[in-house]
Image: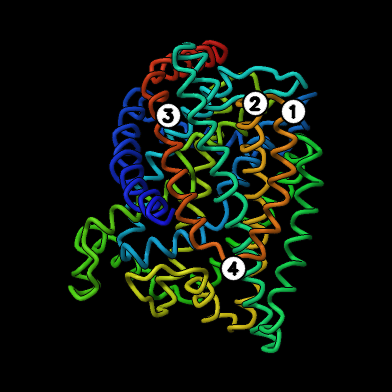
Amino acid sequence: MQAFLDFFTGTLNTVAWMYILLPCVAVGGIWFTIRNKGLQFTKLGLSLKNVFGGLKTKNGSKGSVSPFQALTTALAATVGTGNIIGTSQAIAMGGYGAIFWLWIAALLGMIIKYSEVTLSVHYRERNKQGDWVGGPMFYIVKGMGKAWKWLAILFAAFAGLAAFGIGNLSQANSITGSFNNALTAFIPSMADHSGIVSLVIGIVLAVLTAIALFGGIKRIGKVTEAVVPFMSAFYIIFTLIVIGFNIGNIGEAFKLIFIGAFTPKAVLGAASGIALKEALVWGLRRSAFSNEAGLGSAAIAHAATNETEPVKQGLYGIFEVFADTLVICTLTGLAIIISGIDISFGVKPGSELITGAFATVFGTKFASLFVAIALMFFAYSTILGWSLYGARCAEYLFGIKASKVYQVLFIIMIIVGATTSLDIVWNVADTLNGLMAIPNFIALFALSGVVAKLTKDYFAKQKTLQK
């Protein structure tokens, strides 16, 4: 069993991420950018306009959510520990230059996410309950043909299993870990009661998730619509305060990023062991891990929109990557670098780097408490987003009744994650995330012409209407 786990989290993980996913993000991102004439750049303003205009949009009709709620549900799954811990790991394992490659991956990821969302809305369908359902498993079969159903089944299986790891167990564990650290900072004796605290937090999380999850897509949409903007705004404000207090170091921070992107050893020294390969790989890897562009997961949430124009909803996908990576991850990275805290390069950190950065301005106790609260909101929203993804995958594989069984099991596993040390779960989930991308990218490349045609037709129609 151990030998299999080592293979699954080692060799297979490396193959899935380094030799398949990352090249697909690079090649696919460039190819989709060319085919759609740099849409993520030329229409970024329109994307922002649609999103902020969508704040006033009413709830979706029966079986659907508003375009903005579909966006926040997708963001709920992506804006999370990947932004805090993932960015910290990118810097620690790839050096300061990893942030530059994180940006490059995000710019390419914007058009990839646009393609996923556009295809998802174009090929979606109603289930027996009247809800809109879609995602890679649907655009694989309906776009490529029934002969490719095995590929759709493969995606749904990988995604359904990954939801338990990256979207459940590891998130619950992150919440309890950060809260126990914060409590210990204020009351050292609480370290002896961490097990009880973890159990209580796990039960509360499970109850809150059940309330949202059993209310269906519309309730999940309402919760994420309230939670995601709130938590993102507060986190952004506090990172900006840290950056503002250290604004004199901003030039040096960008210098470290740009030089480190191509010559890490010139910044960190040869003894760090970090070369260009590590900077590039960890930047690309943690970008994909954060915004999920290429994984196909967010397309499941966007399929529930009441928006009828696939391209218009696709523009929300562009904003999703922009907000998640180019804003939140960038601010996290800058706060860490600009604060001047010590970084143990080559060692994977948890939340201690961003906590240390906040502590330089707010003090250790407040920083620990704020990061714990931020992680709670981030991780809880991720649990909600992935609960939807996993349930939809179970429904696709085994029918609508199976999704209810999946939901109950998903809620139970939250308590398990909150009370158990799960280092191996992160590695298993990481591999499953990489494997998800394989069937998704096969479909994206095969259907890139469909996306290009939908895009061309939509904007030609808009140009005609404006005359």
Task: First in sequence, mark 3 or 1: give its number.
Answer: 1
Q: Position of residue 62 (x, y in %)?
A: 80, 24
Q: Position of residue 73 (x, y in %)?
A: 65, 41
Give the answer, above or below, for where 385 lies relative to 168: above
Residue pictured at 53% horizontal, 32% vertical: 46
Circle 4 or circle 1, nearest the eye:
1
Circle 3 or circle 1, nearest the eye:
1
Task: First in sequence, mark 3 or 2: give its number.
Answer: 2
Gap between marks 4 and 1 measured at Cα: 44 Å
Residue pictured at 78% horizontal, 44% vertical: 212
Q: Position of residue 461 (x, y in %)?
A: 52, 12
- Front one among 105 and 362: 105
Q: What crowding class fits label 3: few (fewer than 14 Cα within 10 Å), some (14-19), or many (20 or more)? A: many
Q: Position of residue 299 (x, y in %)?
A: 55, 31
Q: What crowding class fits label 4: few (fewer than 14 Cα within 10 Å), some (14-19), or many (20 or more)? A: some
Gap between marks 1 and 2 measured at Cα: 8 Å
> Which three-letter amino acid code belongs to the residue tagged 1?
Lys
Instruction: Give the quarter of the figure containing the C terminus.
Output: top right
Q: Which residue is mark 1?
A: 401
> Which three-letter amino acid code belongs to the residue tagged 4?
Phe
Q: Are marks 3 and 2 in contact (CB under 8 Å)?
A: no
Circle 3 or circle 2, nearest the eye:
2
SS class of the residue under badge 2?
helix
> Which three-letter amino acid code belongs to the residue tagged 2?
Phe
Q: Which residue is mark 3?
A: 439
Residue pictured at 41% horizontal, 67% vertical: 348
Q: Which residue is mark 4?
A: 238
Q: What crowding class fits label 1: few (fewer than 14 Cα within 10 Å), some (14-19), or many (20 or more)? A: few
Tell me the quarter of the picture where residue 420 sits.
bottom right
SS class of the residue under badge 3?
helix
Gap between marks 2 and 4 measured at Cα: 45 Å
